[in-house]
Image (tube, grey):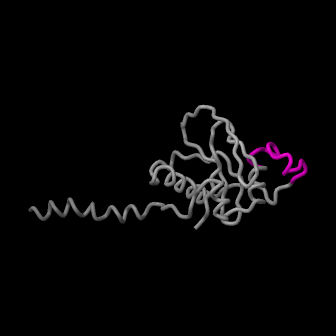
Amino acid sequence: MISKKLALLFVPLLCLPILAACGVQPKGEMCTLEQAYKNGWLTREDIIDIAYFSNDGNALNEETIGEDYAPAQQAGTLSGSVEQQIKLNYSLLQNGDTYGAENVVIDDFFGKYGDCYAVQLGEKDGGSFPVYSEYAVAGINFSSGDTGDVIYVWKAA
């Protein structure tokens, strides 16, 4: 009798790792735009293109980016599987686990550069106070807008 009770108790516990493995696991790496540049994932030309999309043209970089500048590519759109991986990796980076990835929102997509995707992220119902800041990566200026959010880069595995 006791062995049946123990089996009923322990069999579900033994199955948990198997069930967890069935879910989507994060792949690749994620970091800030500045870290991605320092890691050598992105070139200065990539940073200029990302700034062009992020700043709506040559704003903040008039001396570097001319009015007639044309990025090497258009930002395009993200596939569902890439979007899911970005959300999982961002949650892992911020929280140490993927719990809460469903609350991550991709506010902007600034393009794919090799195997790297540049995005600006937020959270659903994540109230924020307006925080405007400017920062530079590779001598190229960026604005965080009124959210204070920086740009993140996900590198596919």
Residue 57 highlighted magenta (yes or no): yes
- Residue 34 sits in which quadrant? bottom right
Quadrant of res 125:
top right
Height in image: 156 above or below 83?
A: below
The answer to whether 77 is drawn above or below residue 107 in the figure is below
Left or right, 79 with respect to 51, comes to left
**Mark count:** 0
Most foreground residue, 94 or 7 = 94
* Residue farthest bottom in this picture: 157
Q: What residue sits 69% from the left and 38% below the top? A: 145
Residue furthest to the left in view is: 1
The reply to whether the magenta stretch includes residue 124 is no
Q: Position of residue 88 (x, y in %)?
A: 52, 55
Residue 136: x %, y % from top left: 71, 48
Above or below, 30 against 128 in this view is below
In the visual, does 102 lie left or right of 18? right
Which residue is at the front of the view, 143 or 20? 143
Furthest residue to the top? 129
Residue 111, given in percent of the width and then of the height, sits at 72, 56
Identify the residue shown where x is 51% and y is 61%: 26
Q: Quadrant of the N terminus?
A: bottom left
Q: Residue at x 61, y 59 (%)?
A: 154
Judged by its main secondary structure, the magenta piece is loop
81 vs 137, nearest the viewer:
137
Q: For the magenta stretch, what is the residue range?
A: 53-69
Residue sticking out furthest to the front: 139
